[in-house]
Each structure stands twice: as C-alpha cells, then as structure tokens.
Amino acid sequence: MGTVIQAEGLTHRYGRHVALRDVDLEVPEGALYALLGPNGAGKTTLLKILLGLLRPTAGRVTLLGKDLKRLTLRDRASIGYVAEDQRLPGWMTLSRLLAYLAPLYPTWDHGLASELQRRFHLPPGRKIRAMSRGERMKAAMMAALAPRPRLLIMDEPFTGMDALVKDELVRGLLELSGDEGWSVLLCSHDIGELEALADWVGFLDAGRLILSEPMEVLRGRFKRVEVMMNGGPFVALEELPPDWLSVDRAGKRATFLIPDHGTDSGQDEVHRRFPGAARVEVRGASLREVFVGLAREGLGRDSVEEETS
Amino acid sequence: MSWLAQVGHVLKKDVRQHRWMIVITLLALAGTVVEAMGWTAVSSPFPVNSLLHVVPTVPGAATFLLASFLLVAFVVQGDSPARSDAFWVPRPLSPSAVFVAKVVLIGFLAILLPAVWEVVAIGSHHLWSASVIGSMGLSVLVQTALLAAVAVVAALTPDLRTFLATFLVAYIGWSAAAPAIRQAVTGVSIGEAGLSPVEAVAWLLGGLALVAYQYRVRDNRHTLRVFALPTFLCLGLGAAFGGARPLAFGAGSTSEAVATPDLRIDSIRLERPPSWGGGRSWDAHVRMELVGGRSGYAYEVIAPKLRVCLPDGSHTTLRVRGIGQRLTNPWVPSVGLTWLGFDPTAKPYRPVVTFLVPTDLVNAVTDPRSRFAVEGRVYVQAPVEVGPLPMRVGATAVADGKRYRLLAFENDQGRPRVGVRYEGVESALRPTPWIRSSFDLTLVNAARQEAIYVRQSDNTSDSHNLVFMRERWAAGSLSLVPGGGGPDDQPSAVDDAWLDGAELHITDWVSKGSYRLATTPAAVDVRH
C-alpha cells in the first residue's frame, strides 16, 4: 500500500510563534486518518500546508505521489477539502454553487450530488449566506464529496451538524472509503465520531507529531485501569511510573492508562502498587481516554518546560 | 476544463457575482458620457434639461474613476489572493486563469468601454489630431496604471474595509510625499501630480506582475519581499519625475533647437507698502531682460527666487509675490508688412517679477554693495501659426488639436471687430495641460501689405469633462478689437474693402519644456 500524503520536516512559523516543528507525516492510501490534538496544536496549519494553502517555513510535502508544487489541476481535482472556517460564496444559491463547481472536476458525480443534497435536506434555491452554520458545512461537504475525490482532507467537518446527519455522514464516509478506496485525513474535536471512523491516528501536540499509528495498535498500546480502594490510603499518585498516563482520582477511585506490553506485568505492577485495593478493573482504552491522557501528558510537560525555562 | 475555459468560467461567475457593482460602474460611465458628449450643455425649454444641467456639477469622470476603483476591489477580492481560506484556493482552478479573468473584466468595463466612448465623444466634437490621439493614449495608459495600482492594494488586503483604509492612507501619503521628493530631485515644485508615459508603463506592468504573482503564491509577505525593490524604484522615480509639468530638462539643455537665453536683471524698484497694509515688507519689482531667446518663441519664468548677497557677506532668498507679465515674444508674420497702429514687434520684452523684501532688509538691499541673482525655471513655448482664416463667417482652421472658427466680423466706423471661437481637447497629461486662451492675433491684408494687431476685448470660455478624468473639452469665444490696449495704439481707419480682403492670423504655442536658469550675481540699480 502506498502513501497519499507524505510530509517531511514540516516547520511553520507565524512570526516568532512556531506552529509546526519538524513534522513527518505519512498517510497510507485508503486510510481514514484522524489527526488529534488540543487547541492550538497546529492541526489546521498542518492541513493548510498539505493543501498548499500555506507555505511552510521548511519541509516538503508529497501528495498523491507528487511533490506539492508539481501538482497539476487534474491532481488537485482529485483532492477534496472541507474546513470549518472555509469561506463559501454567500451570494450563490446551493444549486449555483454546484453548477459552478461541477465543470471544474472531471469526476463530478451529479447523482452523488443529488443524493447528498437529499440526505442533507439542503434547499437548492437558498443562498448560502442565508443558511445556518450547519447547513453551510453540509454544503461544503457536498462540494467536496461530489467530485469523488481520491483524497479528502477535512478540518472539523462535523461542526454544527446534528447527530443524525453526523452519523449518516460518518457511515457514508466509511462506505465510500471502503468501497472506492478514498483516503481521508481529518481532524475533529468529536473524538467519538473519529473513533468510529478512523483506522489511523496521529497526535499533534504543540506543533510536534508525537504519535502516528494504526488505531488498533494505539488501542492495544494502552489499557485503562480503574482502582477502587477499600478505605485504605492511596499511594502518592506522583510516585507512579512516568509512562502511566492520565492519572485521575475521585474519592476512593483512581483511573489511569498504563502501557500494554502484551504481558501481565502491567497488571501485576498495579496490584503491587495498590495492595489494599477493593477492586482493580482493567480494559482496553478508548480513543478519547488515550487522547485525554496524551493531551494531559503534553500539558504537564509544557508546564514543566515552562517552569524549567 | 482547459485554461481558456476556466477564464471564461470565472469571468461568467464574476459578472454574476458583481452585477450590481457593474451596473453602478456603467451608470457612472453613462453620466460621464452624457457630460463628455456635451449634451448637458445644450439649453432647451424642456424641463428634463434643467435636470440635466445639474449633472455637470457632479464630476462625472471622477465618479466613474471612483466606481472603477471599487469595481477593481470587488472583482479582485471576490476571489481574494490575500486569504488562504478563500473559496477558490483549494479548487482545481489555475491562479493565472483567475487573474486573467479579472483583468479581462476590469479591462473591458473600466478601460475599453470608456475608451470607446472617449473616441465617440472626441469624434462628435470633430477634434481629432495627432496630439489628441497621443494625449488620449496617455490617458488610457495612466488610467490603466492607476487601476493596476488599485488592484495591487486589493490583492494585498483581505476585505473591502482594509482595502479602503489602506488605499486612503497610501493615497494621502503619496500625495504628501510626491511633491516633496519632486522638489528635492528636480527643483520644480509646480505642476500637478501625474504619471509620465514611462512611469505609467512601469506602474502598469509592475502592478499586473505583482497581482499575478500574489495570485500564484497567495502570501503577502513573500510577494512584498519580491516586489519591494521594484516598487520602491517605481514610486521614487515617479515621485521625482512623474509630476514635473512642464517637462523638465537639465540645466542648460533643452530639446530640439530651443535657444537657451540669458536672464538679466535690468533694474529693481522698491516700493513702500501702503500704511494700511501693515508695513511688514516692501515690494521689490524686479525688471528682467531675456537675451538670446529664439525669435517668435514664448518664454515664461516659473517659480523664481531672488537671491541677495548682502554687504555683510550673508545671503538671503526673497519670496516671490507675483509675476506681472509673461515673457512673450509675439510671433506675427511681420516681414514686409506695415503695421497700422500698434506695432507688437516693438513691444518691450521685459518681465517684471515682484518679490517681498522684509522691512529690516530694505537698507541692506539698497546698499550698492549688494549683489542680486534670480533663480528659477524658464518655460519655453514654440509658436504655431494657425490659419489664416479668411474673412468669411464660418471659416475654420485646425491646428494642434484645436479648431478655430470665425463667428462674425464687422467694420465699425473703420475699426474692425472680429468674433472667433476656438475649441480643443485639454489633457492634464500634456506638457501644456490647458488650452491657452491668450493668442496673438493679427489681421493681415496681403494685397496691401498691411497688418493690424488685434487684441481680445472680451472672452468667454466653456468646458466639460471627457470620459477620462484628465481630459476635457474646452472652448471659448473671443471678441477682437484693434490695438495693443494702450491710449496711443489706435490704428488708422480701414475701409470695408480692406477688411473683406484681410485674413486673420492666429499664433498659438506648443510647449517645448522648461529648463533651470540662474543669473550671475550682479550689482543692480535699486531705486525707491
């Protein structure tokens, strides 16, 4: 399997602020890649650079096997883009927007456009500026999906969408990705949806890509442990191993993520550290738990860095 | 979709998107055309024309230019190259196709269409000539260059509000800085801000290149870095030389074979100011003499300064108060003619320039050890002989883009009276921006080898804008009577037969430019 996106050493500065630091990213062909990260991590900057909307300060991008600067219009026509902050021509009606875009894409699927319009319940004659935020996102989504792109890049695509449409869209993306081999790179705060969608995950923190791996591998790397004490005292949580993430304590209950080494050594360590525990429950970690754990770890590291600096 | 099809596709979208701005621009153009054709100047009993008479009070060409500026801003920012989140950016659209679509739309509406109407308007006045074609070509070029400059601002700003603020700041800054730079480089402070042809071409090509580049890279900082030096050179050179009207030659050199005369100070007469005037400064009437000027050419002192080397070795420069007389050398076909009455060729050829002398300097200025020198520029004009117009009502002659028509003539008890109308195209971009209404006029009876100098006893003028802002149609009517205006200038009476056999000779001038001139400091007879 090849890669549809390959970024090497991407760095981007906004004045003195470094938004991206030496990011290497590979998105396999056919993957549904979820890019996670806290606010200000550099996700949108990274996506804009990948699309050529921003010039990186340093680094190189290859899209669909070609250097970004050498992409032809035909190549560009096979890349779809949806962004939360993307400006749509408010003076156009939906039908005019579609009529304007259709000739630009050789692979434009009028049937799919009609189908999406019906599913999204979008009035064709309404001007875009008169649409709600959610409707505008749906319109942008339609415009991106109707050309049946080989690569779809989406930045917070579910913003403003109701749960029903979101669910439908997720299912639709899964279908299209599976059936037609589309590759999708998306970032969203809606981790629940991403978990259902993504088969690859990348985590961006403070401009650095700190992990990028298949969802299954990521899930397998961490286990969620919940410890219920039986009245006895907790050990000082600060003394726990540094690779235990997202340590949280509420009353008699403490939860954290431990790395899964494929043996029972981790659980043995939990029992060893909490000998008086009334109950120890270990299960696979969800993407949300991993994200929160990693994000907290990042915040903790940042505060330590700030203190030391 | 091919590149050309993309241009058409974007163009079609732009027409629909900006239809209201296009309508406003076309309405502004229509108003300008109505004015340019002179329709508003026609008096009529119909009430509609009383409404139309209001139109000239609105400067149509300026309104159209402003509408064009806004059109450029709307069209360019409709697919903004300054925003990374613009709708067109992630689409499979060629940036050059988007750019060309904008150029085509703006070029058609703001350049081609008005140019066509300008041609129609000038044609309706029957004023075509090489000079009119030249000045109209320059007007088109300058208007295009201005729109390119506006497009640059639009391409570097993300929205209309920022565009308007940036444009205002740039315009005010440029208007303030350009005359100062020009004064520092050329020493010429006169003349209105304008663009020379070379400068206009530089602005146009540079502006288009910048906007095209910005469409490609969509990065203000990068674009500005690439274009910083050419822009600086273009603006700096433009400020230095662009607005210098008339054409400024180097010291001591003029174009063609224009003789460079010497300016000498003949005498200075100091005049005490009236007591009610405050008495802060005296008037120094400096009578000068121009020696070595080419026969028939007109010379004019521009922005003179009187430098005084005082007896104590210090220097002072006196401010000019007024120039009393243009340095003209009347050009009349006088060879072999007998002048009946006033002889213009005998007219003294001495300008008087009045300077302000502060009261505390009067004693030093009148000291015989003081030395005086005049600095300034001399504006040179060559004579153009028009006509002659035979004494026939309706007779016309055309020269240098101006048309002259004999309206009426009569012999009032031996004193001929003649009415003449002139009209032409004025262009602020020509070295001589405005049509001169002060001609030298002579009635010549070739058969009798006699001539009468006629002066203007009355004149009226009329003008209206043409489509481009820097061009106007101007006309005037002159009433001519014999003599030089003095009490002893009355000619002897002529009979009707003399007048019927006469022709009206008109002398007009065309600009040859200006050059720097300074007198050598010398002692001058200063009288009270």
Image: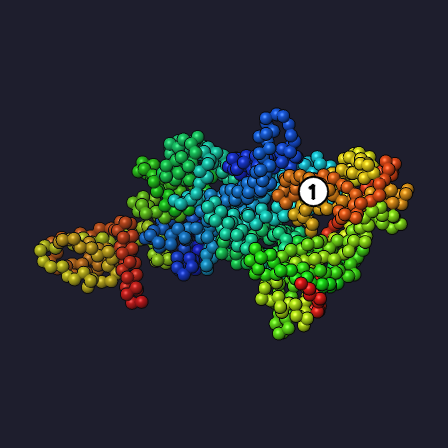
Name, please, the residue furthest toward the right: B447
Name, please, the residue furthest toward the bottom: B312
Query: In the rendered image, which quarter is residue A164 located in?
Result: top left
| Pointer 1 chain | B
Question: Which percent across, then down, holds residue B254?
Answer: 74, 59
Q: Residues within 10 Å of mark 1 (few under 14, many from 20)?
A: many
Q: Is residue B240 visible?
A: no
* Residue at 46%, 36% in the rendered image: A91
- Whether residue A159 sits left or right of residue B403 in the image: it is left
Q: Is residue A40 visible?
A: yes
Q: Which residue is mark 1?
A: B425
Name, please, the residue furthest toward the front: B275
* Amino acid type, mark 1: Val
Question: Which percent across, then down, holds residue B515?
Answer: 70, 60
Q: How is the image coloured?
A: rainbow
Pick the front one: B477 or B152 = B477
Pick the front one: B155 or B283 = B283
* Residue at 62%, 69% in the rendered image: B364
Question: Which percent across, then down, holds residue A13?
Answer: 42, 58
Query: In the rendered image, which quarter is residue B235 located in?
Result: bottom right
Question: Which percent across, then down, holds residue B281?
Answer: 59, 61
- Whether residue A130 sits left or right of residue B468 in the image: it is left
Query: In the rendered image, which quarter is residue B450 located in?
Result: top right
Quadrant the N terminus of chain B occupies: top right
At mark 1, the secondary structure is strand
Pick the front one: B8 or B28 = B28
